[in-house]
Amino acid sequence: MEDTIAAISTALGIGAISIVRVSGKEAIEIVNQIFKSKNLTNVPSHTIHYGKIMDKNKEIDEVLVSVMKAPNTYTSEDIVEINCHGGIATTNKILELVLEHGARLARPGEFTERRFLNGKIDLIQAQGVKDLIAATTDEKRALAVNQLNGKVSSKIEQLRQEILEQIIANIEVNIDYPEYEDIKKLTNEDIFPKLINIKNKMNHILEESKNGIMIQNGIKTSIIGRPNVGKSSLLNTLLGENKAIVTDIEGTTRDIIEGEIIVSGIPFHIIDTAGIRKSDQLVEQIGIQKSFELIEKSELVLFVLNNNEELTEEDQKILEKLEGKNKIIIINKTDLPNKLNLEKNLLQESVMISALNETGIDDLKNKMKQIFHLEQIQTEDPTYLTNANSISFLKNAMTDIEQAIDGIKNNMPIDMVEIDIKNAWDNLGLIIGKTYQDELINQLFSQFCLGK
């Protein structure tokens, strides 16, 4: 981190303002070489100065330059931000001049990476920065803010402290100073309930994190059913646009058509699939096979039936496939006479709609809320893990604790049990970056936008 980095921190395009950010030991000196107004090396920290950016004797733009001196900056290094007029040519030219005078182009996320490496944030907070920038719903924003302000990190840190202070430290004292009579002799029976308590806390965080994944990634939802039951009409009604072609001809939908709706702040990624029926046409057969595959991959299946037709053999096969899945049985075309002979228990669980007349759609959305307890998520303070790596490390830590518990049950020596407990402590450290792997850091920050 000895070099000085620079990048455009605003979206590149036509706008009122663009910002070129420079960070590093030479940030102030580099910008001072192209800034005409006053000597930036002599100005106080956290001040803004009006002037012009010059390329030798040629004026490039009139700007406001913010000077922020280490350590009280985003990266803990000297930072200069050049606020110029928005525009591709102007912004690129100023960045070009900064690079010509000694800075190098920052990698995606490198400013935030330096903030992490300089100890200002942990890995969960860094993830929160990225998620806050990408947030498209208020729920995603709230989730990211709680990551950024350290609420999520504190849960993991508390677990680490509990393992360290209540278990590891006591084990170490017993092993290192067995001759001291005033030290309580720690036995496997003393550790066992503490490990059970820690395991339960870990499991609780993992269960809660399912909500975090749901908020962040949305819910994979597929619309399944025979041809002409109204699947494409339902998709169009939910999306509020004519995205899927609707005709009376069977087999119109042969490929996957996708869209997204927001229900109680949670994205539902909805896929309209090919109608499931016996077909001799190769292309349609492929589409039908994809429909069956999507049933397995989907987190929610909307199974559409035609109110004006009797239940068929294909319908029964689909119902069998849906056993144990999150599903909503939708009876469409309620504006037509009822001919559907559905079992009473399934009928009671069904949602009645008319996609053509757009009736029953609110009932369908309410059913979607109930299945995933979305109202509960909305009322809770969202302090969840959302990153796949973080969740994986927590699962590894819980496995370590479970192995320690098994070791105690099998009367293993306490110093052997301690190995698994220390591994759990290390895995928790990987979540917040107390211990970290270079490839993990590179992977996380490479996902950031350039300039952050």
Image (cartoon, helix red, strand yellow):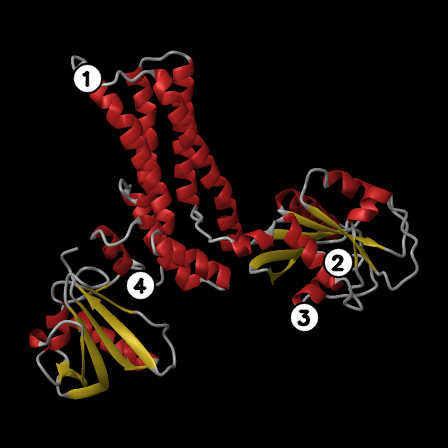
Mark 4–mark 2 contact, CB under 8 Å?
A: no
Q: Nearer the viewer, mark 4 or mark 1?
A: 1
> Which residue lies at the image location 41% right of the left edge and 24% below the top edge?
193
Residue type marked 4: Lys
Asked whether the beta carbons under mark 4 and mark 1 sit within 8 Å of each other, the answer is no
Looking at numbered disc 1 in the image, what kind of residue is underneath it?
Asp
**Residue at 28%, 31% in the rendered image:** 164
Q: Which residue is disc 2 drawn over? A: 231
Along the polypeptide, which appears first: circle 3 or circle 4? 3
| Alpha carbon distance from label 1 to label 2 | 74 Å
Q: Which mark is residue 241?
A: 3
Provide the secondary structure element on which disc 2 rests: helix
Residue 88 position, x and y percent, is 34, 79
Q: Amino acid at mark 3?
A: Glu
* Of callouts 4 and 2, the N-terminal one: 2
Checking the image for residue 182, the label placed there is: 1
Q: Which residue is mark 4?
A: 452
- The first of marks 1 and 3 along the sequence is 1
Q: Tell me where residue 274 sits by quadrant.
A: bottom right
